[in-house]
Amino acid sequence: MKISDWLDQKEAENVDVSQIALPANMLAGEDPDETIFYKEFRPCGLFCTENHPFSTVERFGHWYLCRGQDKKAGIHSSKMKWSIFTKDKDFALQTARAHME
C-alpha cells in the first residue's frame, strides 16, 4: 500500500495523521514522488560524518512529509527530531524553513 493511500485510509477513520508514525517498513519501501525542499546546517564542513540539523519536505501523492532535526538542537546532536504530514504544501514549506532559523 502506498503511503498516500494509507494516510487517506487513516484520515477516513478520523485519525489525526499529522503526527502519525508510519509502519516501520513503509517509509523505507517507497521513494517520495519528489523532494520539494532540503536544507542542512553543516558549518563544520562537507566531510563531517556527524549529525547535523536539517529540514526536508517530500511529496508522497497528495501528502507532504515535512521532517528534520531542529537547528536549535545544535550541530552533532541527535535530539529535537520532528515530523509532520500535511496536504498543504505552503504549510509544509513554512514549517521546514522555520525549523532551520
Image (cartoon, rainbow, N blue to C red):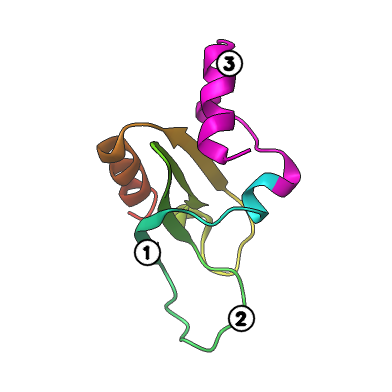
What residue appears at the point 51 percent right and 62 percent down from the top-left corner?
74
Left or right relative to 101: residue 58: right
**Residue placed farthest to the left in the image?**
90
Q: Mark 2 and mark 1: span between their CA atoms?
A: 16 Å
- Which residue has dot 2 on it? 49
Q: Name the disc covering residue 39, or none.
A: 1
- Total number of numbered discs in the rendering: 3
Q: Residues within 10 Å of mark 1 (few under 14, many from 20)?
A: some
| Helix, strand or loop under label 2 | loop
Residue 99, given in percent of the width and then of the height, sits at: 39, 49
Q: Callout 2, which amino acid?
A: Thr
Q: Which residues are magenta?
A: 1-25
Q: Secondary structure at mark 3?
A: loop
For the residue pair 68 and 26, the one nearer the viewer reads as 26
Q: Quadrant of residue 62?
A: top left
Q: Which residue is mark 3?
A: 15
